[in-house]
Amino acid sequence: MSIYFDNSATTKVRQEVVDAMMPYLMEEFGNPSSIHSFGRNSHKAISHARKQVADLLGCSPTEIYFSPCGTMSNNVAILGRARFVKANGLGQHLITTQIEHPSVLGPSKLLEAEGWKVTYLPVCGEGFLNPEDLRKAITKETSIISVMWANNEIGTVQPIAELGQVVMEEAAKHGTEIFFHTDAVQASAKVLIDLSSAQGVSALSISGHKFHAPKGIGGLFLRKGVNIMPITFGGGQEKALLPGTEGLANVVALGKAAELARLDLEECCSRLKELAQYLIAELSQIEGVQITGTRDLDRRLPGHVSITVENAEGEALVMQLDMKGVCASSASACHSGVIEPSHVLSALQLPCSRTKGSLRLSLGRYNTKEECDKAVEVMRAVFRPKPASKKTLTAGASK
Ligand code: PLP
């Protein structure tokens, strides 16, 4: 049996979630926009799911919009707000960080190409954004800020409530309105999110497949009174912001997954933290292994361990581990024969000898201590330092 340590890539759908969604594929298949009983039942199921998601995030159901995935939520938030900014003649300055997911960096680059000023803030060696750096970057032209709640590669959890406070203070100082979006695709259902207290957050993205719902369903929180304009057009669903016939069964699944996650969030979190702590302690003892991101597990995604293995190649490590039954992932990819670190590892300014061999182990609710023991044993064997080849020695000596 393989050990699945790639829960940041995607998760297994929970049995209770499958059970909840099945009727909406078979008996209750009505279009939620239809006014007959089939349609009304579907509409009711969608309203229920909206409440379940809102309860997970600490907001009102009227502030939740369903989307096809986290990528779409991020694009709608940033590009939709940018349309509103342009239509209202507001300042065209966007601030984001160097370690965002491509679904935030992509729209940011598009806006930059269209003439926006875009600031990509650096992070410290552990991957944290300093709130004072954000404060200094805000000007009276700043209208959009997007900072991820937690990073997929290095697990760093940003102080979003504190950053939101900075945004509100600076907006008040400049007499402007700043839209503060956060990509919480990795954070939601893993760290406590309470949007009733994080008042500085205007919009937030989530994705179901990261917390045991199926792939193909996401959500966007948009705070009451905050305006964005649609970037796609259709039948007016989701208050015309995310039009298209709702993926009914998937919406029901997202609601159920959110409800279940909320029930044991703290308990699951502390168990995953313990497993991560154990893995970190064991892996740190292996020669050439270093942890990336922070060792402070209160500021890291639960169950998330990211490392670099000196003089190794990330993709090769993933393949070797896979052959021995451990599924993990790497942030270093081989492009045209050259191993390149991801933009996230590059932003941490680690030396090349370290970033080439990156590896991410992301544990989820189904992983056990026994699996960690077995995986450590496998990794000890795989990471064993290789003797330098003759060729390397000669090449090294000539330099
Ligand atoms: N944002 C982050 C931080 C992610 O890790 C991912 C997916 O890995 C996404 C956005 C995109 O989400 P989705 O796969 O639902 O499009």
Image: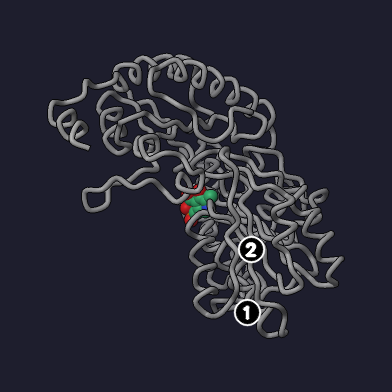
Q: Residue at position x 69%, y 34% from top? A: 263
Residue 218, compared with residue 155, is above or below; it is below
Residue 45, compared with residue 116, is above or below; it is above
Secondary structure at numbered mark 2: strand
In percent of width and height, residue 290 lies at 45, 27
Colour convention of the picture: one colour
Q: Amino acid at mark 2?
A: Ile
Q: Amino acid at mark 1?
A: Arg
In percent of width and height, residue 177 lies at 79, 71
> Mark 1 = which residue?
83
Q: Residue at position x 81%, y 53% from top? A: 165
Q: Is residue 97 left or right of residue 227?
A: left
Secondary structure at numbered mark 1: helix
Number of other residues with Cα within 10 Å of mark 2, as a class: few under 14, some 14 to 19, many 20 or more:
many
Foreground residue among 20 and 291: 291
In percent of width and height, residue 271 lies at 61, 22
Tell me the distance, in whole angstroms, between the alpha carbons under discs 1 and 2. 16 Å
Q: How many marks?
A: 2
Residue 95 is labelled as: 2
